[in-house]
Image (cartoon, rainbow, N blue to C red):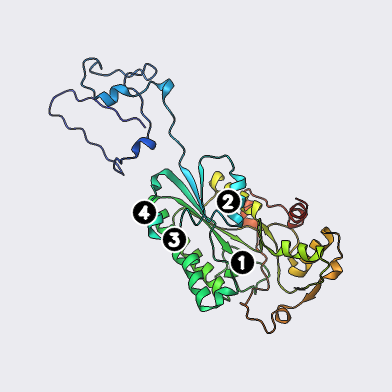
Amino acid sequence: MGNAFQTLEDNTAYTYLVNDHWSADAQSQYTFLNLADETAAIDWPVPLDQAELSDKDKAHPRLAEVEPMPSRKILVVGADGQLGKALRGLYDGDPSVEFAARADFDLSKEESFDGRNWKNYSAIINAAAYTAVDAAESPEGREAAWQVNVSAVARLARTAIEHDLTLVHVSSDYVFDGSRESHDENEPYTPLGVYGQTKAAGDAVVSVVPRHYIVRTSWVIGEGSNFVRTMASLADRGIKPSVVNDQIGRLSFTEDIAAGIRHLLESRAPYGAYNLSNDGEPQSWADIAGDVYELRGASGDDVTGVSTEEYFAGKSAAPRPLKSILDLSKIKGAGFVPASSAERLTAYLRG
């Protein structure tokens, strides 16, 4: 859009409708072209050498020297977690993506939101979450889970609405009770424990944002401590563990979650909720542990399968959904086909 005009008579008022006001840092959001640029070849009613121009207008560059307007940026919050690290790797070298760890952007503080010029952004990816499932059942954990998974998400949602941003929010299979064979995006929330309750509440908040993607995952594996790394360590040390065999689902590797998020944003898929785990045959945790043992050169028979009830007997633990299989039809229909969990597991342990 270009905005330039001449008034041909004195005492003439020129007005136009805007949806925002000029700000002190507007120079970083707009670019300018000299009114006399030869390539624009504007036939001004009053020749410019006879018109009244400000010194600033006269100093604007010709088209060959104009710096293009920078792209509006994507802000990734929670960039120091497993998914945040995968997003850093995926967008490495892309100046249009900005990463903020908790030290850079504290979601619990209003000043984090007030101190940022949101006009420079097009989207927020929320990779931050409280994920200590068992600790969330304690009084302190319950408060922390609600702060991070709901209150902070509400601040992000408000910001997205006020500034017309796209909000990408990562959800969990724990919003369901696991009573169905598989879960699609239209299933009502039925969380069993505090963690699941806070994730469901966060999803409900994000759903009111006009431009939103809720990306629902299960059994996340990425850089850092996780189930696969734990099992690999046990296999390497010759330990024969007991692992739960009645919780069924699929792993979600962070590189695929990150790639799926990028696909949704770049393809401009219809807004809404999308299940996103890796593909392949659903397995129990014990099945996955057995695969890890085999890949580490140990025997899968070293893993003993036990029920959830047996495993947590005498322990303080949150209730868990037994069936966490996410229906991937919608994300595939949007053009993103996740790799199989078996393929990713092999590459992860050999990488």
Are the residues flagged by discs 4 and 1 in contact, CB closer than 8 Å? no
Secondary structure beneath label 3:
loop
Compared to 95, does 166 lie above or below? Answer: below
**Residue 79 picture location, percent across and down:** 55, 53
Q: Amino acid at mark 1?
A: Asp
Of circles 4 and 3, the one toward us is 4
Q: Mark 4 and mark 1: span between their CA atoms? A: 33 Å
Residue 240 is drawn in which quadrant?
bottom right
**Closest to the observer, 70 or 11:** 70
Which of the labelled discs sits on residue 208, or is there none? Answer: 3
Mark closer to the chain start, 4 or 3 = 4
**In front: label 3 or label 2:** 2
* 133 left or right of 206 in image: right
The residue tagged 1 is 173
Name the residue carrying label 2. 261
Within 10 Å of disc 1 (Cα), the crowding (few <14, some 14-19, many 20+) is many
The answer to whether marks 4 and 3 mark residues whose Cβ atoms lie closer than 8 Å is no
Q: Kindly identify which residue carries mark 4.
A: 114
